[in-house]
Amino acid sequence: MIDLHAHSIYSDGTDTPERLVELAEQAGLTALALTDHDTLEGLDRFLACQPRTGVELVPGVELSCRYLGRVLHVLGLFVDPLDPAFRARIQDMRDRRVERNRAMVARLRELGVPITWEEVAALAPTDTVSRTHFARALVARGAAGSPQDAFRRYIGDDGPAFVPLRDLTPGEAAAWIRDAGGVAVVAHPGRFTSRAFRWDEAMAELKAAGMAGLEAHYPDYGPQEHRYFLDLAADLDMVASGGSDYHGGHKPGQHLGVGTGSLHVPDAVLDQLKGRRPGCAV
């Protein structure tokens, strides 16, 4: 069993990279990917654990893109975290995130929530500030009853305080990932918009833009949705990837490898993705 989608303190998770490796060992995983949002900063600590563990550690990242007017996340798996061009591009993404975050503070203040950048940043254990930290700050201020309420009322994709990152297209993300030796995977497509959305044509377009796989195995999917994405991946000759999208304490009840208990990503998926890396024959 493998898990190709997990987050650490370097984006919006609560566990260190080292702790994630320990949890993967305890869960009996054969492979784990660290895929923090728009940053490579935790990968050196993560990969430094490789000599001490039997779990295969996969370097990854989760890039925020804009597609059909909404936020679409793209996973880059097997990327080279030392690639100079890729590091420069990710640093630009980090700079964009800071600009976006400060704009969201201003938007919240316009809405009557007197929040400051300093109180939001203070909740992040590293330099990466995400909407999860905004949600916690809003709860602390009494402006929301829970993190979920904060997203619903203010900072969700359709919320009045949400400010999207400067546009990165899925095709650009796929090219960046490919240039860094990695494989691009559409993250949790079932969360992209309403469950009534038909992915047939959209996913074919994303495949043409450079996506090699899609997350067909995901904790939030019901049996019908799981089967739909498995069949879609097969129809389009894309890899049916998957992972828990583990965030530690920010997602209570989610566990590495098994999600809420029923997730199971087959080991064979790892070799299928490796076969889609640049220079490998499909």
Image (cartoon, helix red, strand yellow):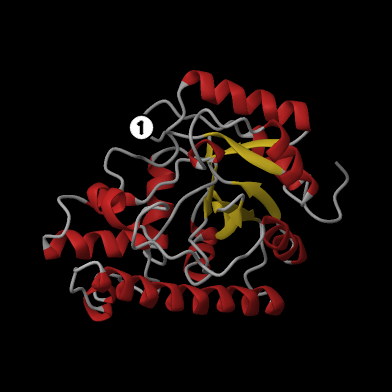
- Asked whether, in this view, residue 239 is left or right of residue 257, the answer is right
Q: Please tell me which residue is depicted at 67% across the width and 56% down the height of the picture.
A: 170
Dot 1: few (<14), some (14–19), or many (≥20) neighbours within 10 Å? some
Q: Please tell me which residue is depicted at 26% across the width and 47% down the height of the picture.
A: 148
Q: Please tell me which residue is depicted at 49% across the width and 58% down the height of the picture.
A: 52
Q: Which x, y percent locates residue 245?
A: 45, 45
Q: Which x, y percent locates residue 223?
A: 49, 19
Amino acid, disc 1: Thr
Q: Which x, y percent locates residue 183?
A: 71, 52
Q: How many marks?
A: 1
Q: Which x, y percent locates residue 172?
A: 71, 63
Looking at the image, is 253 positioned above or below residue 209? above
In front: 266, or 30?
266
- Asked whether, in this view, residue 76 is left or right of residue 207, the answer is left
The C terminus is located in which quarter?
top right
Callout 1: SS: loop
Tell me if I can see residue 232 in this picture.
yes
Tell me if I can see residue 127 in this picture.
no
In front: 8, or 101?
101
Looking at the image, is 98 positioned above or below residue 36? below
Q: Which residue is mark 1?
A: 260
**Quarter holding residue 14:** bottom left
Q: Please tell me which residue is depicted at 68% across the width and 28% down the height of the picture.
A: 232
